[in-house]
Amino acid sequence: MATELILASDEFNAIDDPKKLACHAGVAPFEHSSGSSVRGKTRVNHHARKSLKTLLHMAAMSALQVPGELQE
């Protein structure tokens, strides 16, 4: 997990903001809006790094299975 995050962010030089990393991984949904109107549901960018999104999802699911601080 840590290795993939370091590689995805070019050792945290290219992506230093957590919001940018979440957007790059495809885990930050954004609403589609134009002016004052909001259209449809919130969606993630389809250009996201899907392998990183899958890895983050699997890490979260694994953390839920193991009793401890992360499960709480």
Image: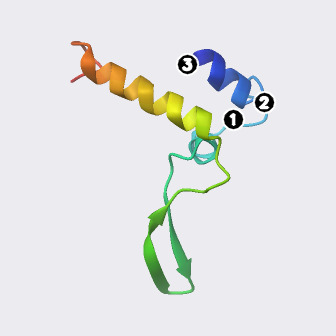
Which numbered disc, 3 or 1, marks the residue closer to the eye?
3
Tag 3 secondary structure: loop
Q: Which residue is mark 1?
A: 16
Give the Cα separation between the discs numbered 2 and 3. 18 Å
Residue type at tag 2: Asn
At 33% across and 20% down in the image, what residue appears? 63
Residue type at tag 1: Asp
Q: Are marks 1 and 2 in contact (CB under 8 Å)?
A: yes
Percent x, y for residue 68?
A: 23, 12
- Residue 1 has which mark? 3
Give the Cα separation between the discs numbered 3 and 1. 17 Å
At 21% across and 24% down in the image, what residue appears? 72
Q: Earlier in the sequence, mark 2 or mark 3?
A: 3
Q: Are marks 3 and 1 in contact (CB under 8 Å)?
A: no
Percent x, y for residue 49?
A: 65, 41
Which numbered disc, 2 or 3, marks the residue closer to the eye?
3
Instruction: Please give left or right for residue 64 compared with residue 35 in the image.
Output: left
Percent x, y for residue 1?
A: 55, 19
At 44% across and 33% down in the image, what residue appears? 57
Q: On the image, which quarter does residue 11 sit in? A: top right
Q: Are marks 2 and 3 in contact (CB under 8 Å)?
A: no
Residue type at tag 3: Met
At 62% across and 56% down in the image, what residue appears? 46
Q: Earlier in the sequence, mark 3 or mark 1?
A: 3
Work out whether 6 lies above or below 15.
Answer: above
Q: Which residue is mark 2?
A: 13
Q: How many numbered dots are placed on residues in this image? A: 3
- Residue 70 has which mark? none
Tag 1 secondary structure: loop
